[in-house]
Image: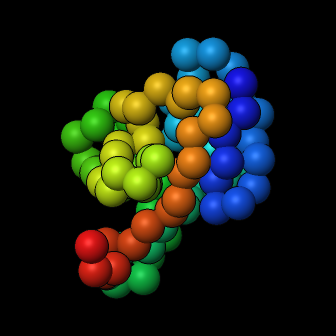
Amino acid sequence: MRITVDGETLAGEAGQTIAGVLLAAGRRSWRRAPSGAPRGVFCGIGVCFDCLVIVNGVRDVRACRRRAQEGDIVTTQSRTEAP
């Protein structure tokens, strides 16, 4: 299974979350908090919202909860960006 993250194609396993694909690719953070601190997976269960990404044009998707699907287009986002 392959997804595209910020224009880069990443391979993952069926059933893997988007966060799992990102972590397996060596990415530990993929967004910035308003303070500028790096954010990625913190809780891993969808409680903290630190891992938000845009998936297929939908903002604020929790990467730790969303199963990656073939062909997903993922864009990283910042909490300071306007919708």
**Residue shown at 42% from the left, 82% from the top:** 36
* Relative depth, front residue between 59 and 50: 59
As drawn, 69 above or below 35: above
Q: How is the image coloured?
A: rainbow
In the displayed structure, does residue 27 sit left or right of residue 29? right
Quadrant assignment, res 22? top right
Tell me if residue 19 can be seen.
Answer: yes
As drawn, 32 above or below 11: below
Residue 60: x and y, percent? Answer: 30, 54
**Residue shown at 57% from the left, 48% from the top:** 73
Task: Give the tally of numbered discs.
Answer: 0
* Relative depth, front residue between 7 and 51: 7
Residue 59: x and y, percent? Answer: 33, 56
Looking at this rendering, what residue extends furthest in the left direction?
47
**Residue shown at 27% from the left, 73% from the top:** 83
Quadrant assignment, res 1? top right
As drawn, 81 above or below 19: below
**Residue shown at 23% from the left, 40% from the top:** 47
In the displayed structure, does residue 67 sit left or right of residue 28? left
Residue 10: x and y, percent? Answer: 75, 42
Residue 35: x and y, percent? Answer: 34, 83
As drawn, 80 above or below 48: below
Tell me if residue 21 can be seen.
Answer: no
